[in-house]
Amino acid sequence: MEPDLPMRESDRSPSLTELLERCAGNDRRAFAELYAATSAKLYGTVLRILKNERWSEEVLQEAYIKVWQKADSFDAGKASPITWLVTLARNTAIDQLRREPTAANDGDEVIDLLPGHFPDGEQKLAQSREQEQLLHCLKQLEDGRADLVRLAYLDGLSRIELAERFEQPVNTIKTWLHRALKQLKGCMS
Amino acid sequence: MSDHDDLDMLAAEFVLGTLEPEAREEVKRRRVQEPELDQLIQAWENRLAPLGNEIDEIKPGPNLFSRIEQRLDELESAQDRPGETGAAGDQLTALKLRLRRWQWSTALASAASVLLCILLLNKPTPELAPQSFVAVFQHDDQQPAFMLSVDLQSRSLSITPVTAEAIPGRSYQLWIKADPLGPKPRSVGVLNANMEIDGASLTQYDPALLKQATFGISLEPEGGSPTGQPTGPAIHGFLYPANPAQLSL
Protein backbone atom coordinates (compact mmCIF):
# COMPACT_ATOMS: atom_id res chain seq x y z
CA MET A 1 0.00 0.00 0.00
CA GLU A 2 1.24 3.45 -0.83
CA PRO A 3 2.28 5.09 2.36
CA ASP A 4 0.92 8.52 1.50
CA LEU A 5 -2.69 7.45 1.06
CA PRO A 6 -4.77 9.10 3.76
CA MET A 7 -6.22 5.82 4.89
CA ARG A 8 -6.28 6.36 8.57
CA GLU A 9 -7.50 9.31 10.50
CA SER A 10 -4.30 9.37 12.50
CA ASP A 11 -2.37 9.83 9.28
CA ARG A 12 -4.28 12.73 7.97
CA SER A 13 -5.23 14.49 11.16
CA PRO A 14 -2.20 16.77 11.27
CA SER A 15 -2.78 17.99 7.76
CA LEU A 16 -6.48 18.61 8.33
CA THR A 17 -5.62 20.52 11.47
CA GLU A 18 -3.13 22.55 9.56
CA LEU A 19 -5.64 23.23 6.80
CA LEU A 20 -8.19 24.39 9.33
CA GLU A 21 -5.63 26.69 10.90
CA ARG A 22 -4.84 28.15 7.51
CA CYS A 23 -8.57 28.58 6.83
CA ALA A 24 -8.77 30.54 10.05
CA GLY A 25 -6.10 32.76 8.54
CA ASN A 26 -8.28 33.35 5.46
CA ASP A 27 -6.36 30.99 3.19
CA ARG A 28 -8.76 30.02 0.42
CA ARG A 29 -6.36 27.51 -1.09
CA ALA A 30 -6.31 25.67 2.19
CA PHE A 31 -10.10 25.74 2.16
CA ALA A 32 -10.11 24.17 -1.31
CA GLU A 33 -7.74 21.46 -0.09
CA LEU A 34 -9.84 20.89 2.97
CA TYR A 35 -12.93 20.55 0.80
CA ALA A 36 -11.20 18.12 -1.53
CA ALA A 37 -10.06 16.01 1.39
CA THR A 38 -13.30 15.96 3.37
CA SER A 39 -16.31 16.72 1.17
CA ALA A 40 -17.02 13.07 0.30
CA LYS A 41 -17.08 12.18 3.98
CA LEU A 42 -19.28 15.12 4.89
CA TYR A 43 -21.58 14.62 1.92
CA GLY A 44 -21.94 10.94 2.80
CA THR A 45 -22.85 11.99 6.33
CA VAL A 46 -25.45 14.52 5.24
CA LEU A 47 -26.91 12.36 2.48
CA ARG A 48 -27.32 9.44 4.86
CA ILE A 49 -29.45 11.69 7.09
CA LEU A 50 -31.42 13.65 4.50
CA LYS A 51 -31.61 10.97 1.79
CA ASN A 52 -32.13 13.54 -0.90
CA GLU A 53 -29.29 14.66 -3.12
CA ARG A 54 -30.32 18.21 -3.93
CA TRP A 55 -31.24 18.99 -0.36
CA SER A 56 -28.01 17.42 0.86
CA GLU A 57 -25.91 19.61 -1.44
CA GLU A 58 -27.69 22.71 -0.12
CA VAL A 59 -26.97 21.64 3.42
CA LEU A 60 -23.38 20.71 2.61
CA GLN A 61 -22.87 24.16 1.14
CA GLU A 62 -24.20 25.72 4.31
CA ALA A 63 -21.96 23.46 6.37
CA TYR A 64 -18.79 24.45 4.50
CA ILE A 65 -19.66 28.14 4.81
CA LYS A 66 -19.79 27.52 8.55
CA VAL A 67 -16.50 25.63 8.40
CA TRP A 68 -14.87 28.66 6.81
CA GLN A 69 -16.46 31.08 9.24
CA LYS A 70 -15.80 29.01 12.35
CA ALA A 71 -12.39 27.59 11.48
CA ASP A 72 -10.78 29.84 14.08
CA SER A 73 -12.86 28.20 16.80
CA PHE A 74 -11.54 24.73 16.00
CA ASP A 75 -9.54 23.49 18.98
CA ALA A 76 -7.33 20.51 18.20
CA GLY A 77 -7.15 19.80 21.92
CA LYS A 78 -10.87 19.14 22.13
CA ALA A 79 -11.68 17.16 19.01
CA SER A 80 -10.01 15.67 15.99
CA PRO A 81 -10.49 17.79 12.89
CA ILE A 82 -12.60 15.17 11.12
CA THR A 83 -14.83 14.81 14.18
CA TRP A 84 -15.23 18.58 14.32
CA LEU A 85 -16.12 18.71 10.62
CA VAL A 86 -18.51 15.77 10.67
CA THR A 87 -20.17 17.13 13.80
CA LEU A 88 -20.72 20.46 12.13
CA ALA A 89 -22.19 18.82 9.02
CA ARG A 90 -24.35 16.44 11.07
CA ASN A 91 -25.74 19.26 13.18
CA THR A 92 -26.57 21.32 10.11
CA ALA A 93 -28.35 18.34 8.53
CA ILE A 94 -30.26 17.38 11.66
CA ASP A 95 -31.34 20.98 12.24
CA GLN A 96 -32.73 21.05 8.72
CA LEU A 97 -34.38 17.67 9.09
CA ARG A 98 -36.07 18.62 12.35
CA ARG A 99 -37.39 21.79 10.76
CA GLU A 100 -38.83 19.84 7.83
CA PRO A 101 -39.13 16.29 9.10
CA THR A 102 -40.97 14.90 6.10
CA ALA A 103 -39.17 16.84 3.39
CA ALA A 104 -36.68 14.09 2.69
CA ASN A 105 -39.52 11.90 1.53
CA ASP A 106 -40.35 14.35 -1.20
CA GLY A 107 -41.01 12.27 -4.28
CA ASP A 108 -38.69 11.79 -7.16
CA GLU A 109 -35.30 12.62 -5.79
CA VAL A 110 -35.34 10.41 -2.78
CA ILE A 111 -32.42 8.15 -3.01
CA ASP A 112 -32.63 4.59 -2.01
CA LEU A 113 -30.76 4.50 1.22
CA LEU A 114 -33.01 2.58 3.48
CA PRO A 115 -31.87 2.78 7.04
CA GLY A 116 -31.39 -0.30 9.07
CA HIS A 117 -28.89 -2.21 6.99
CA PHE A 118 -25.69 -2.26 8.92
CA PRO A 119 -23.01 -4.34 7.33
CA ASP A 120 -20.58 -5.10 10.04
CA GLY A 121 -18.96 -1.78 10.61
CA GLU A 122 -15.55 -3.14 11.33
CA GLN A 123 -14.56 -4.01 7.81
CA LYS A 124 -13.97 -0.51 6.57
CA LEU A 125 -12.96 1.08 9.78
CA ALA A 126 -9.73 2.49 10.84
CA GLN A 127 -9.09 0.31 13.80
CA SER A 128 -8.37 3.03 16.23
CA ARG A 129 -8.65 2.25 19.91
CA GLU A 130 -11.71 4.47 20.23
CA GLN A 131 -13.32 2.67 17.34
CA GLU A 132 -12.70 -0.75 18.77
CA GLN A 133 -13.94 0.35 22.13
CA LEU A 134 -17.18 1.82 20.81
CA LEU A 135 -17.89 -1.26 18.69
CA HIS A 136 -17.17 -3.51 21.63
CA CYS A 137 -19.50 -1.49 23.85
CA LEU A 138 -22.27 -1.38 21.26
CA LYS A 139 -22.16 -5.17 21.16
CA GLN A 140 -22.68 -5.29 24.91
CA LEU A 141 -26.04 -3.54 24.60
CA GLU A 142 -29.29 -5.45 24.70
CA ASP A 143 -30.67 -6.77 21.42
CA GLY A 144 -31.57 -4.07 18.95
CA ARG A 145 -30.27 -1.21 21.05
CA ALA A 146 -27.12 -0.75 18.97
CA ASP A 147 -29.36 -0.39 15.92
CA LEU A 148 -31.39 2.16 17.85
CA VAL A 149 -28.26 4.23 18.44
CA ARG A 150 -27.07 3.84 14.86
CA LEU A 151 -30.44 4.74 13.34
CA ALA A 152 -30.47 7.92 15.38
CA TYR A 153 -26.85 8.89 14.89
CA LEU A 154 -26.28 7.81 11.31
CA ASP A 155 -29.73 8.10 9.77
CA GLY A 156 -31.09 10.98 11.80
CA LEU A 157 -34.22 9.20 12.96
CA SER A 158 -36.23 11.14 15.55
CA ARG A 159 -37.69 9.58 18.68
CA ILE A 160 -41.06 9.36 16.93
CA GLU A 161 -39.57 7.63 13.91
CA LEU A 162 -37.71 5.24 16.16
CA ALA A 163 -40.95 4.57 18.02
CA GLU A 164 -42.68 3.68 14.76
CA ARG A 165 -39.83 1.54 13.60
CA PHE A 166 -39.53 -0.40 16.84
CA GLU A 167 -43.30 -0.38 17.40
CA GLN A 168 -42.96 1.07 20.86
CA PRO A 169 -44.35 4.12 22.62
CA VAL A 170 -42.14 7.19 22.34
CA ASN A 171 -41.49 7.17 26.08
CA THR A 172 -40.21 3.63 25.87
CA ILE A 173 -37.81 4.69 23.13
CA LYS A 174 -36.61 7.52 25.31
CA THR A 175 -36.03 5.10 28.16
CA TRP A 176 -34.20 2.68 25.87
CA LEU A 177 -32.05 5.47 24.47
CA HIS A 178 -31.08 6.74 27.90
CA ARG A 179 -30.27 3.27 29.13
CA ALA A 180 -28.21 2.49 26.03
CA LEU A 181 -26.35 5.79 26.24
CA LYS A 182 -25.54 5.32 29.91
CA GLN A 183 -24.36 1.78 29.28
CA LEU A 184 -22.16 3.00 26.45
CA LYS A 185 -20.67 5.72 28.59
CA GLY A 186 -20.05 3.33 31.46
CA CYS A 187 -18.52 0.75 29.14
CA MET A 188 -16.25 3.28 27.46
CA SER A 189 -15.01 5.04 30.57
CA MET B 1 -31.43 10.63 38.76
CA SER B 2 -29.18 13.53 39.60
CA ASP B 3 -29.23 16.87 37.86
CA HIS B 4 -25.88 16.03 36.37
CA ASP B 5 -27.27 12.80 34.91
CA ASP B 6 -30.18 14.71 33.45
CA LEU B 7 -27.83 17.22 31.91
CA ASP B 8 -25.63 14.44 30.57
CA MET B 9 -28.61 12.71 28.93
CA LEU B 10 -29.67 16.03 27.46
CA ALA B 11 -26.18 16.40 26.00
CA ALA B 12 -26.16 12.80 24.77
CA GLU B 13 -29.52 13.09 23.04
CA PHE B 14 -28.53 16.42 21.57
CA VAL B 15 -25.52 14.76 19.97
CA LEU B 16 -27.54 11.72 18.95
CA GLY B 17 -30.05 14.09 17.35
CA THR B 18 -33.14 12.67 19.04
CA LEU B 19 -34.26 15.71 21.02
CA GLU B 20 -37.53 17.30 20.04
CA PRO B 21 -36.95 20.39 17.87
CA GLU B 22 -37.77 22.84 20.67
CA ALA B 23 -35.52 21.08 23.15
CA ARG B 24 -32.77 20.99 20.54
CA GLU B 25 -32.98 24.72 19.97
CA GLU B 26 -32.94 25.30 23.70
CA VAL B 27 -29.79 23.23 24.12
CA LYS B 28 -28.12 25.26 21.38
CA ARG B 29 -28.92 28.44 23.28
CA ARG B 30 -27.95 27.05 26.67
CA ARG B 31 -24.59 25.58 25.68
CA VAL B 32 -23.28 29.04 24.83
CA GLN B 33 -23.81 30.13 28.42
CA GLU B 34 -23.29 26.85 30.26
CA PRO B 35 -19.75 25.53 29.99
CA GLU B 36 -20.69 22.32 31.78
CA LEU B 37 -23.35 21.49 29.20
CA ASP B 38 -21.00 22.44 26.39
CA GLN B 39 -18.31 20.13 27.75
CA LEU B 40 -20.76 17.25 28.15
CA ILE B 41 -21.83 17.74 24.54
CA GLN B 42 -18.26 17.69 23.30
CA ALA B 43 -17.56 14.55 25.31
CA TRP B 44 -20.51 12.83 23.64
CA GLU B 45 -19.45 14.07 20.22
CA ASN B 46 -16.07 12.45 20.74
CA ARG B 47 -17.57 9.31 22.26
CA LEU B 48 -19.92 8.66 19.32
CA ALA B 49 -17.68 10.01 16.58
CA PRO B 50 -16.25 6.59 15.62
CA LEU B 51 -19.72 5.69 14.33
CA GLY B 52 -18.98 8.14 11.55
CA ASN B 53 -16.51 5.62 10.16
CA GLU B 54 -19.50 3.51 9.13
CA ILE B 55 -20.59 6.20 6.69
CA ASP B 56 -19.78 5.69 3.03
CA GLU B 57 -17.90 8.49 1.39
CA ILE B 58 -19.88 9.90 -1.50
CA LYS B 59 -18.65 12.68 -3.76
CA PRO B 60 -20.99 15.64 -4.07
CA GLY B 61 -21.71 17.19 -7.46
CA PRO B 62 -18.70 18.66 -9.28
CA ASN B 63 -20.03 22.21 -9.20
CA LEU B 64 -20.70 22.43 -5.51
CA PHE B 65 -17.34 23.84 -4.52
CA SER B 66 -17.53 26.69 -7.00
CA ARG B 67 -20.97 27.51 -5.62
CA ILE B 68 -19.51 27.57 -2.12
CA GLU B 69 -16.68 29.82 -3.25
CA GLN B 70 -19.10 32.14 -4.97
CA ARG B 71 -21.13 32.32 -1.80
CA LEU B 72 -18.02 33.14 0.22
CA ASP B 73 -17.14 35.88 -2.26
CA GLU B 74 -20.57 37.37 -1.78
CA LEU B 75 -20.28 37.23 1.98
CA GLU B 76 -16.81 38.73 2.02
CA SER B 77 -17.60 41.51 -0.40
CA ALA B 78 -20.50 42.45 1.85
CA GLN B 79 -18.21 42.52 4.85
CA ASP B 80 -15.58 44.56 3.09
CA ARG B 81 -17.86 47.47 2.53
CA PRO B 82 -17.82 49.97 5.38
CA GLY B 83 -21.03 50.28 7.28
CA GLU B 84 -22.17 46.84 6.26
CA THR B 85 -21.95 43.70 8.27
CA GLY B 86 -22.81 41.14 5.70
CA ALA B 87 -26.46 41.64 6.42
CA ALA B 88 -27.36 41.33 2.78
CA GLY B 89 -25.51 38.05 2.59
CA ASP B 90 -27.18 36.78 5.71
CA GLN B 91 -30.47 37.89 4.31
CA LEU B 92 -29.76 36.06 1.10
CA THR B 93 -28.98 32.91 3.02
CA ALA B 94 -32.15 33.35 5.03
CA LEU B 95 -34.16 33.88 1.88
CA LYS B 96 -32.68 30.82 0.27
CA LEU B 97 -33.41 28.71 3.29
CA ARG B 98 -36.91 30.08 3.50
CA LEU B 99 -37.43 29.20 -0.14
CA ARG B 100 -36.10 25.75 0.58
CA ARG B 101 -38.41 25.24 3.49
CA TRP B 102 -41.43 26.50 1.68
CA GLN B 103 -40.51 24.49 -1.34
CA TRP B 104 -40.08 21.28 0.58
CA SER B 105 -43.21 21.68 2.61
CA THR B 106 -45.15 22.72 -0.45
CA ALA B 107 -43.88 19.86 -2.52
CA LEU B 108 -45.32 17.56 0.08
CA ALA B 109 -48.72 19.12 -0.10
CA SER B 110 -49.16 17.64 -3.50
CA ALA B 111 -52.71 18.85 -3.87
CA ALA B 112 -51.83 22.39 -3.05
CA SER B 113 -48.66 22.82 -4.95
CA VAL B 114 -47.42 26.20 -5.83
CA LEU B 115 -45.11 27.68 -8.37
CA LEU B 116 -42.52 29.28 -6.22
CA CYS B 117 -40.29 32.16 -6.61
CA ILE B 118 -38.30 34.35 -4.38
CA LEU B 119 -37.07 37.86 -4.64
CA LEU B 120 -33.41 38.41 -4.67
CA LEU B 121 -32.36 41.53 -2.91
CA ASN B 122 -29.50 43.45 -4.36
CA LYS B 123 -27.09 44.48 -1.73
CA PRO B 124 -27.96 47.79 -0.19
CA THR B 125 -25.01 49.84 -1.27
CA PRO B 126 -26.73 53.18 -1.55
CA GLU B 127 -25.01 54.57 -4.60
CA LEU B 128 -24.90 51.27 -6.47
CA ALA B 129 -28.07 49.48 -5.68
CA PRO B 130 -31.10 50.18 -7.72
CA GLN B 131 -33.75 48.85 -5.40
CA SER B 132 -34.58 46.04 -7.71
CA PHE B 133 -35.14 42.35 -7.17
CA VAL B 134 -35.22 39.64 -9.73
CA ALA B 135 -36.45 36.12 -9.37
CA VAL B 136 -36.51 33.29 -11.84
CA PHE B 137 -39.12 30.56 -11.67
CA GLN B 138 -38.31 27.20 -13.06
CA HIS B 139 -40.68 24.72 -14.50
CA ASP B 140 -39.93 21.09 -13.64
CA ASP B 141 -36.56 22.33 -12.45
CA GLN B 142 -35.49 22.60 -16.07
CA GLN B 143 -36.68 25.65 -17.89
CA PRO B 144 -37.25 29.14 -16.60
CA ALA B 145 -40.99 29.72 -16.53
CA PHE B 146 -41.27 33.27 -15.27
CA MET B 147 -39.10 36.15 -14.30
CA LEU B 148 -40.29 38.57 -11.72
CA SER B 149 -38.81 41.95 -11.02
CA VAL B 150 -39.70 44.40 -8.31
CA ASP B 151 -38.47 47.93 -7.75
CA LEU B 152 -38.45 48.42 -4.03
CA GLN B 153 -38.33 52.18 -4.14
CA SER B 154 -41.49 52.55 -6.18
CA ARG B 155 -42.86 49.19 -5.04
CA SER B 156 -43.72 48.42 -8.63
CA LEU B 157 -43.53 44.91 -10.03
CA SER B 158 -43.63 43.19 -13.36
CA ILE B 159 -43.77 39.58 -14.41
CA THR B 160 -42.25 38.27 -17.61
CA PRO B 161 -43.25 34.83 -18.83
CA VAL B 162 -40.22 33.03 -20.20
CA THR B 163 -41.50 29.61 -21.20
CA ALA B 164 -44.73 29.73 -19.25
CA GLU B 165 -47.76 30.01 -21.49
CA ALA B 166 -51.26 31.12 -20.88
CA ILE B 167 -53.57 28.16 -20.34
CA PRO B 168 -57.18 28.55 -21.45
CA GLY B 169 -59.57 28.43 -18.53
CA ARG B 170 -56.75 28.82 -15.98
CA SER B 171 -55.06 31.77 -14.35
CA TYR B 172 -51.68 32.29 -12.73
CA GLN B 173 -51.85 33.95 -9.35
CA LEU B 174 -49.06 35.68 -7.44
CA TRP B 175 -48.81 35.27 -3.67
CA ILE B 176 -46.82 36.89 -0.94
CA LYS B 177 -45.81 35.21 2.28
CA ALA B 178 -44.12 36.98 5.18
CA ASP B 179 -44.09 36.45 8.91
CA PRO B 180 -45.88 39.73 9.75
CA LEU B 181 -48.71 38.67 7.43
CA GLY B 182 -49.32 35.44 9.28
CA PRO B 183 -48.61 31.86 8.32
CA LYS B 184 -50.60 31.75 5.09
CA PRO B 185 -49.74 33.21 1.71
CA ARG B 186 -51.69 36.32 0.79
CA SER B 187 -52.81 36.98 -2.77
CA VAL B 188 -50.98 39.78 -4.57
CA GLY B 189 -53.00 39.48 -7.76
CA VAL B 190 -54.04 37.35 -10.68
CA LEU B 191 -52.22 37.55 -14.01
CA ASN B 192 -54.45 38.61 -16.86
CA ALA B 193 -54.79 36.84 -20.22
CA ASN B 194 -51.68 38.64 -21.47
CA MET B 195 -49.76 37.28 -18.48
CA GLU B 196 -49.49 40.71 -16.95
CA ILE B 197 -50.14 41.83 -13.44
CA ASP B 198 -51.10 45.20 -12.03
CA GLY B 199 -47.71 46.86 -11.49
CA ALA B 200 -48.98 48.63 -8.38
CA SER B 201 -50.10 45.48 -6.60
CA LEU B 202 -47.43 45.78 -3.93
CA THR B 203 -47.83 49.43 -2.96
CA GLN B 204 -49.70 48.53 0.21
CA TYR B 205 -46.66 46.63 1.51
CA ASP B 206 -43.81 48.18 3.37
CA PRO B 207 -40.44 47.81 1.57
CA ALA B 208 -38.96 46.27 4.71
CA LEU B 209 -41.63 43.60 4.63
CA LEU B 210 -41.09 43.03 0.92
CA LYS B 211 -37.42 42.41 1.58
CA GLN B 212 -38.34 39.63 3.98
CA ALA B 213 -41.18 38.16 1.98
CA THR B 214 -41.32 35.00 -0.04
CA PHE B 215 -43.30 35.06 -3.27
CA GLY B 216 -45.08 32.27 -5.03
CA ILE B 217 -47.20 31.75 -8.11
CA SER B 218 -49.80 29.07 -8.49
CA LEU B 219 -51.89 27.89 -11.40
CA GLU B 220 -55.52 28.43 -10.48
CA PRO B 221 -58.98 28.21 -12.00
CA GLU B 222 -59.78 31.14 -14.27
CA GLY B 223 -59.96 34.35 -12.32
CA GLY B 224 -57.93 33.10 -9.38
CA SER B 225 -58.10 30.72 -6.45
CA PRO B 226 -61.63 30.13 -5.23
CA THR B 227 -60.44 29.45 -1.70
CA GLY B 228 -58.21 32.43 -1.10
CA GLN B 229 -55.24 30.08 -0.82
CA PRO B 230 -53.06 28.55 -3.54
CA THR B 231 -54.60 25.36 -4.90
CA GLY B 232 -52.84 24.74 -8.23
CA PRO B 233 -50.08 22.46 -9.49
CA ALA B 234 -46.41 22.74 -8.62
CA ILE B 235 -43.51 24.20 -10.44
CA HIS B 236 -40.46 24.90 -8.34
CA GLY B 237 -38.43 28.06 -8.35
CA PHE B 238 -34.74 28.58 -7.93
CA LEU B 239 -32.73 31.61 -7.09
CA TYR B 240 -30.45 33.29 -9.53
CA PRO B 241 -28.45 36.41 -8.90
CA ALA B 242 -30.23 39.38 -10.39
CA ASN B 243 -26.95 40.86 -11.43
CA PRO B 244 -23.95 38.71 -10.69
CA ALA B 245 -21.56 41.59 -11.27
CA GLN B 246 -23.32 43.57 -8.63
CA LEU B 247 -23.44 40.70 -6.24
CA SER B 248 -19.72 40.22 -6.36
CA LEU B 249 -18.84 43.87 -5.90
Image (tube, grey):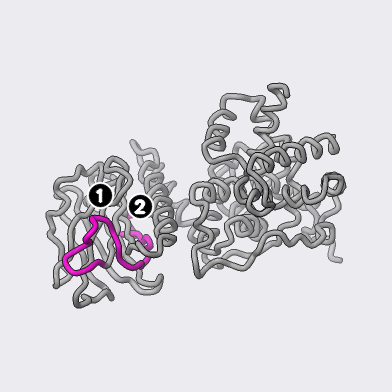
Residue beneath the point at 78% across and 51% down: A144
Instruction: Identify the subunit bearing mark 1.
Output: B
Horizontally, residue B246 falls left or right of residue B55, namely left
Residue A123 visible, this orientation? yes
Proximity of marks 1 and 2: CB atoms separated by less than 8 Å: yes
Q: Secondary structure at mark 1?
A: loop
Q: Which residue is mark 2?
A: B249
Would you name the residue on which mark 1 appears? B128
Total labels: the figure holds: 2
Amino acid type at image mark 2 = Leu
Spatial separation of the CA atoms under disc 1 and disc 2:
10 Å
Q: Residue at x 49, y 51 (%)?
A: A100
**In the figure, residue B192 lies in which quadrant?**
bottom left
Could you tell me which secondary element the residue under label 2 belongs to?
loop
Q: Are marks 1 and 2 on the same chain?
A: yes
Q: Residue at x 58, y 48 (%)?
A: A94
Q: Chain of mark 2?
A: B
Queried whether the magenta region covers residue B225, the answer comes back as yes
Image coordinates of residue A95 in percent, x first then y, are: 54, 46
Please, is residue A174 above or below residue B119 in the view? above
Q: Amino acid at mark 1?
A: Leu
Reply yes or no: does residue B198 show up in magenta. no
Magenta segment's dominant SS is: loop
Q: Is residue B126 above or below residue B42?
A: below
Q: Which residues are magenta?
A: B220-249
Q: Is residue A84 left or right of residue A105?
A: right
Query: In this orientation, does residue A131 appear?
Result: no
Q: Nearer the viewer, residue A29 or A94?
A: A94
Q: Is tag 1's residue or tag 2's residue first in the polypeptide sequence?
A: 1
* Residue farthest along the top direction in this orientation: B2
Measured as percent of width and height from the top left, residue A3 is found at 84, 61
